[in-house]
Amino acid sequence: MEEYRKLSIKDWAVEDRPREKLLYRGLASLSDAELIAILIGSGNNEETAVELSRRILGSVKNNLNALGKLDVEALKKFKGIGEAKAIAVIAALELGRRRNQSGALKMQQITSSRDAANFLQPVMGDLSHEEFWILHLNRHNKIIHYERISQGGLTGTVIDVRVILKKALEKLATSIIIAHNHPSGNLQASDSDRKITRQLRDAAKLMEIPLLDHLIITQTGYYSFADEGIL
């Protein structure tokens, strides 16, 4: 489509315009840049919406997960992207994340660390800050409830053992799994990770609510305290 670079999208052949392409060829025919172009609607004086979208994607090495971590101010640095367009892109990517999360909800029973990681990855895997979550399970190891316990910064979050056990009692959980993410991608457990795991394990045992696992989640993988024999 190099011959169209100096033309506006309205001057392109109908079948090459992103919206028309979606209608006549289906979603699968559109590139990531073309889908983003539909969201932003227009480019700037020098670029079409598609070209601008390609440049935005290029800034994050064409990684949609990385794009999802950009905030409004970061997107507004691109000429032609104002607040409304930036919000539209961020909202669309968040919907995609929640769609993945909804898919995970169908998988209710946890039989391994992989099951728990698959459930939690869409929830917290690509966050740019640390969060701490808990899965409440019944006696069949089915998730009856899950929630975020705390949210922190880039390098940590505050965890209160009493709050975690209070939540588990309220939900009548038979057992629990805890998890937090490492935005850095580092899958190594820190000394503080090990300490809080031991504290919660011992406290939960007294309450007869076993701690089945503690997971560290990243964008591309996970670390299981149970699998490593730490629990």
Image (cartoon, rainbow, N blue to C red):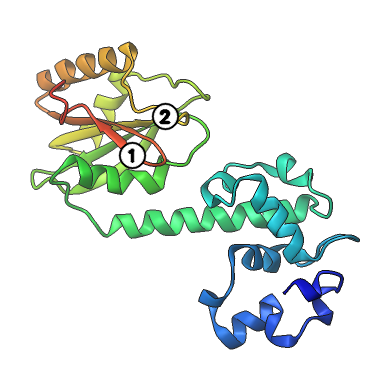
Task: Give the structural element (helix, strand or loop) at label 1.
Answer: loop
Q: How far is mark 2 from mark 1, CA to CA?
A: 10 Å
For the point 83% across and 61% down, the residue is 47
What amino acid does circle 2 point to?
A: His
Q: Is residue 3 above or below residue 62?
A: below
Please state the horizontal and vertical placement of residue 226, each as a whole percent of the image.
16, 29
Please state the horizontal and vertical placement of residue 24, each as a whole percent of the image.
60, 88
Nearer to the camera, 137 or 157: 157
Please state the horizontal and vertical placement of residue 3, each as a whole percent of the image.
79, 75
Task: Give the structural element (helix, strand or loop) at label 2.
Answer: loop
In the picture, the quarter occupied by the N terminus is bottom right
Residue identified by numbered label 2? 182
Nearer to the camera, 208 or 7: 7
Please state the horizontal and vertical placement of residue 79, each as a whole percent of the image.
84, 50
What amino acid does circle 1 point to?
A: Gly
For the point 15% across and 43% down, the residue is 112
Between disc 2 and disc 1, whose residue precedes?
2
Q: Is residue 39 left or right of residue 44?
A: left
Q: Is residue 128 left or right of residue 1?
A: left
For the point 73% across and 87% down, the residue is 14
Q: Return the residue found at the far right.
A: 45
Residue 197, by quadrant, is top left
Residue 201, by quadrant, is top left
Residue identified by numbered label 1? 221
In the picture, the quarter occupied by the C terminus is top left
Residue 103, by quadrant, is bottom left
Q: Residues within 10 Å of mark 1 (few under 14, many from 20)?
A: some
